[in-house]
Image (cartoon, rainbow, N blue to C red):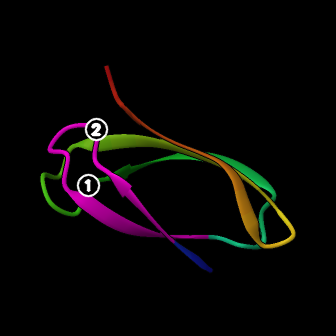
Amino acid sequence: MIEHFFQCPYCWEEISMLLDGSLSQTEYIEDCEVCCNPINISFQQEEESIVSFSAQAMD
């Protein structure tokens, strides 16, 4: 697991999320731990480093 910090697109609070390091690329929806709004999370990693990360509001 890789811990990644980012700002919630709704409440702008910095939150952390554990990302599954066994996957090279994934996309899923997870609720913000502060405001509980759904966030569309997508990321790509190479050799245990995150090369792209996106946290988008669900419109």
Left or right relative to 19: residue 51 = right
Find out whether residue 10 is within the magenta segment: yes
Q: Is residue 53 magenta?
A: no
Within 10 Å of the Cα at label 2, are there few (<14), some (14-19), or many (20+) other Cα atoms? some
Principal SS element in the magenta part?
strand
Q: Residue furthest right?
A: 47
Quarter occupied by residue 2: bottom right
Numbered disc 2: secondary structure: loop
In this rendered view, identify the residue nearer to me: 59 or 4: 4
53 w.r.t. 9: above or below: below
Dot 1 corresponds to which residue? 32
Q: Quadrant of the N terminus?
A: bottom right
- Left or right, 58 with reference to 12: right
Rendering coords of residue 11 (x, y %): 14, 44
User: Where, quadrant-wise, is the C terminus in this rendering?
Assistant: top left
Vertical placement of 49 versus 8: above or below? below
Q: Which residues are magenta?
A: 4-19
Pointer 2: what residue?
9
Q: Along the horizontal axis of the image, is 27 left or right of 44? A: left
36 to the left or right of 49: left
Q: Position of residue 36 (x, y in %)?
A: 17, 52
Q: Which amino acid is tagged 2?
A: Pro
Tell me which corner region of the image, top left, top right, bottom left or bottom right, holds residue 57. Answer: top left
Q: Nearer the viewer, mark 2 or mark 1?
A: 2
Quick one: label 1, few (<14), some, or many (20+) residues within 10 Å? many
Residue 46 in the image: x percent, y percent?
A: 85, 61
Residue at x-position 28% and y-position 47%: 8
